[in-house]
Image (cartoon, helix red, strand yellow):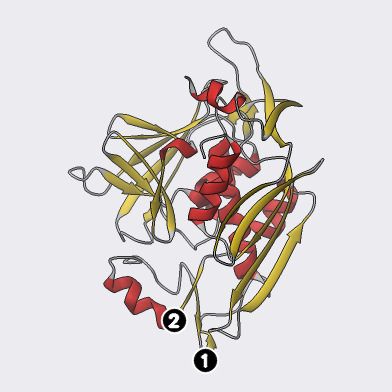
Amino acid sequence: MSVSNVLRSSKLVSWNPTGRLQQTLAGCVERNGAGLHSGKVSTVRLWPELASRGRYFDFRSRSIPAAVEFAQVSPLCTTLSKDGIRIRTVEHLLSALEASGVDNCRIEIEGFDDEENDAEIPIFDGSAREWMGAVEEVGLMVATDLDGKSVEKMAPHVNEPVFAWRNDSFVAAFPSETVQITYGINFPQAPDIGCQWFSTSPLDNLVYSMQIALSRTFCIHEEIEPMRNAGLIKGGSLENALVCSAKNGWLNPPLHFSDEPCRHKILDLIGDLSLVARSGNQGLPVAHIVAYKGGHALHTNLARRLIGMS
């Protein structure tokens, strides 16, 4: 059964026309930088792609579709894996592409070490700002197929409530006429973060670029050493993540928003749910998505349930 047929067989979502045409980039744009977890430098080129080809990664002459079928559980990030190739920390880039309407794109990656079969997307300042700037640099155009024809963009509409949860953490999607996201976090061990909620309705490109894209990833200072001992955040610094100490508060203010950590969770969620997309259609479901204390594993579990994988 093809990926498209698997998607259509799900009773939880209906794919409806958006009234818009699929888009792609109007030119190639390149960025390079170090990965948050590996600390290694990679170069990423975003290329225009034909309609219905969707978004996919190209590394060492092998491709991995940006689809949840290839998502792999990994600490503190979303990883795509196929045929022995792994691409880590894809969520910020995919979040920006989904929100800005880049439906079809070849994402070419050159890793620092050609002998390794894995690469990591650069972290930059820990937000999606650099990727949004890259898209704006070259602009968008209508994507066409090999025959020069445009294709209408479809979007997944949630038909009934869908849940993914673990203990007191959950992500849920409820039927809605527009895309709305409500997210809550709770870090009692760091009072300067504490419990935060943020809601955006409806979510569109302008709301994303003004209220979500600038929000940076964050961590608790007292948890840095254990993470590094586990082989994570080798490229982490005060320049690419907000760091909050349980005793001393924020170590690298100012924040872009008072609730920036909560907004960043929405940025991650959009990137992870973009993996519902295929064939150049919208990934983010038309639904009211409500999450509390979620993370990449729960986000991708919800994506799998939406397309009938679990």
**Spot occupied by residue 74 in the image (x, y as percentages of width and height):** 38, 55
Disc 1 residue type (three-letter): Asn
The image position of residue 203, as x and y in percent, is 74, 49
What residue sits 79% from the left and 43% below the top? Answer: 178
Residue 10: x percent and y percent? 61, 30
**Residue at the limit of the structure toward the bottom, as seen here:** 247
From what the image shows, is residue 108 above or below residue 6? below
- Image quadrant of residue 64? top left
Dot placed on the residue nearer the N-terminal end, 1 or 2: 2
Q: Which mark is residue 221?
A: 2
To which quarter of the image does residue 98 belong? top right
Does residue 131 show up? no
Identify residue type, mark 2. His
Query: Residue sitting at 53 percent across and 20 percent down?
Result: 50
Q: Residue at x 80, y 43 (%)?
A: 176
Q: Nearer the viewer, residue 126 or 245?
A: 245
Residue 248 got which mark? 1
Q: Which quarter of the figure has residue 144?
A: top right
**Looking at the image, which is closer to me, 267 or 197?**
197
The CA distance from mark 1 to mark 2 is: 10 Å
Residue located at (38% from left, 68% from top)? 236
Q: Is residue 199 visible?
A: yes
Callout 2 environment at 10 Å: few (<14), some (14 to 19), or many (20+)?
some
Does the residue at mark 1 contact the one at mark 2 (Cβ under 8 Å)?
yes
